[in-house]
Amino acid sequence: MKGIKRLATHLDISIGTVSRALNGKPDVSDATRKRVLEAAATLGYVPNQSGRALRKGITGIIGFMIETGTKTSVDGDTFFLSVFDGVQTVLARHQLDLVALLCSSGENPHEYLRRVVDRGFVDGLIISATQRHDQRIDFLADRQLPFIALGRSLTDRGHAWYDLDFEGLAEAAVDRLVKKGHRRIALAAHIDDVNLSYVLIDGYRAALEARGLSFDPTLVLRGTPDHAGGYAIAQSALAMPDRPTAIVLANEVMSVGVYRGLLEAGVRPGREIAVIGRNSPHSRFLSPTLTAFDTSLRDLGIALAEALLATMPAYQQSYPQGAVRKLWPLHLVAGESDAFSPGQ
């Protein structure tokens, strides 16, 4: 038995009385409530969640929008899986559920998001891959749907966000390489308009100039954020007449492709060129070991979820921090891939 109508028929009382008893309304006697609850348990009554959600105006669902492509499908990227685990850890405290909203690489992200919101599918959203100017932020702010962004944008509506500290990554990587004698340091950046590339390049430029080195735009090598993109960047770096002595990667998937491109050309990471990247399950098996930036993505997911709930009136008492806007730290784990120093 699943329907409330059948439960009412079995008990020979009205549907309204059964409904009020199940929902803990005060105008139902204790004896009737006990009778209804015992019958519901015995007969396997299952409430219609979609009907409840419609009546209450909530869904109990939080959406996490990501854009699919070779990074998430072909290359087996685990970045979002780790973040998802942290997000759901928080949502489970409040009997909320997480749904991954997968926007195809062939679809406009703004149009995809508009369709999801128009359907009233979620109570709140986490968006990622923020663009330099991001229509989604204006749209969600105008619709007054609670949301948080994983990534900054020049589109600023006073909304909550967390972003990885790419400026800190650039500063630490350049500082480490300059101290080893490097002067031609290449930077791998995304080929699209994702804002993290702008932030990364600005941090890279500032780090170079703070150490008396000129910014050379030809050393900013752009590629897709996947294995193939890393492979192409290695080829581009090696094809330069005055090739770089070091490469910095801010993407956690590219390192496998970079290693493949270098080794195919007979150039050994850590011996003839220095490489600093981002840690991932794949990079841990590279040889020589990758000097890489690491962080707890599960903890990032926990922070994202708590910051989102802080923007939702029903949960603000539990999370009174207001609109969070913070950089998420990355720490460097030394390996062997940047052992090479020019002039050795």
Image: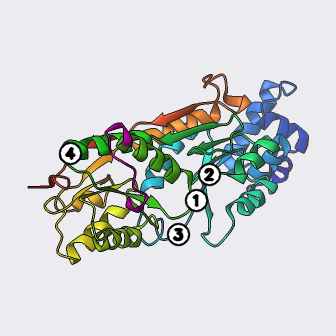
Q: Distance between the Cα atoms at labels 3 and 2?
A: 20 Å
- Amino acid type assigned to the residue bearing label 2 in the image: Arg
Above or below for 106 versus 11? below
Q: Judging from the image, what secondary structure is the residue with disc 4 in?
A: loop
* Residues tagged 2 and 1 counted as in contact (Cβ below 8 A): yes
- Amino acid type assigned to the residue bearing label 4 in the image: Ala
Q: Distance between the Cα atoms at labels 2 and 1?
A: 6 Å
Q: Earlier in the sequence, mark 2 or mark 1?
A: 2
Q: Distance between the Cα atoms at labels 4 and 2?
A: 32 Å
Q: Is residue 208 left or right of residue 24?
A: left
Residue of label 2: 132
**Front disc: 4 or 2:** 2
- Amino acid type assigned to the residue bearing label 3 in the image: Gly
Residue of label 4: 334
| Nearer the observer, 324 or 54 | 324
Q: Earlier in the sequence, mark 4 or mark 1?
A: 1
| Nearer the observer, 99 or 321 | 321
Q: Distance between the Cα atoms at labels 1 and 3?
A: 15 Å
Residue of label 3: 69
Q: Is residue 102 left or right of residue 215?
A: right
Q: Earlier in the sequence, mark 3 or mark 2?
A: 3
Report the magenta residues as a range.
209-219
Q: Judging from the image, what secondary structure is the residue with disc 3 in?
A: loop
* Residues tagged 1 and 3 counted as in contact (Cβ below 8 A): no
